[in-house]
Image: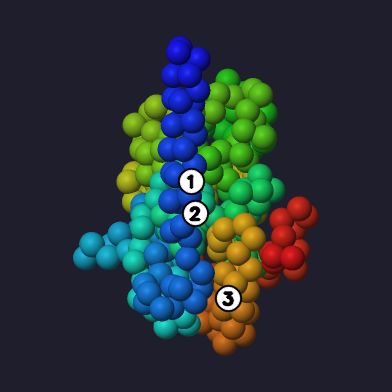
Amino acid sequence: MRNNRRNFLGLALATVAFATVGAATATAASVEEIKAKGTLVVGIQGDNAPWGFVNTSGVQDGFDADVANLFAKELGVKVEFQPLAVANRIPALTTGKVDILFATMAMTEERAKSIQYSKPYAANTISLYAAKADTVTKPEDVAGWEIGVPKSSSQDKAVTDTVGSTATVRRFDDDAATIQALISGQVKAIGGNQFYGQRLDAASAGTYERKIDFLTTYNGVGTRLGEKDWNEAVNAFIDKIKANGELAAITKKWMAIDLPQFPESIPNIPFTVN
């Protein structure tokens, strides 16, 4: 009797798990289904200016928002933005809570195992930021420091790979929390993208500076693995806005730089679905 009950409970749990996975998968719509529905749900960062943020009018804004709006226009649909924390971006996509990610997704081998990247459409330099009074010219100078990063971010990987064996890496929920950790003295330095300097100056002018650069990363649009229709639609769109100058204009608007040169390929990170 006890074994029968145990088997029944195991079957029930397996059924619930299967139903949950099935429900998540069922929400993953094709490009044509989204066109018919008329609304594209875009995963985006909600508090990482100028990439993605909510402006003073309560509207999602920034570089990724502008590109996503253009993509929705290309599909002939409306946009519904879903602001996401760094660590929630991939789960939101793979479970079907969002249709696509325009969410400052640095292209890494590890992430490429979970999502399909498009061709790159933005570049980002990851650096160490600390107080001007602290002398740092090389990674060895931060031995013994506590360094903040947004967890599961490209900064997390860059800092951990470079100084994680000699410094303590502290992980925070998002970019805003990481910046606040430096300002409040919770950490001595932070790993940040190329716009952290502006945000630090806005919070405490003249106090902090960019010390050393770890690497330059490239951002791609994220879609689900194996979904060739989404991947082809996004890549065709990126080619179009590169050619017609729209991507260059958005880059100049938000980053005050010319459109970067993007690599034709990145080892172990496919841009297309075979």
- Cα–Cα span, label 1 and label 2: 6 Å
Q: Nearer the viewer, residue 158 or 43?
A: 43
- Picture layout, residue 141 above or below residue 274: above
The residue furthest left is: 57
- Residue under pointer 1: 21
| Above or below, comparing residue 116 to residue 10 in the picture | below
Q: Earlier in the sequence, mark 2 or mark 3?
A: 2
Q: Position of residue 135 (x, y in %)?
A: 57, 33
Screen quadrant of the C terminus: bottom right
Identify whether 53 is placed above or below 13: below
The residue at 76%/53% (across/down) is 268
* Badge 2: residue crowd in 10 Å (few <14, some 14–19, many ≥20): some
- Residue, disc 2: 25
* Circle 3 residue: 233
- Residue 111 located left or right of residue 68: right
Secondary structure category for the residue under label 1:
helix
Q: Earlier in the sequence, mark 1 or mark 3?
A: 1
- Whether the residues at callouts 1 and 2 have beta carbons within 8 Å, the answer is yes
Mark 1–mark 3 Cα distance, whole angstroms, equals 26 Å
- Residue type for callout 1: Val
Image quadrant assignment for residue 212: top right
Residue type, label 2:
Thr
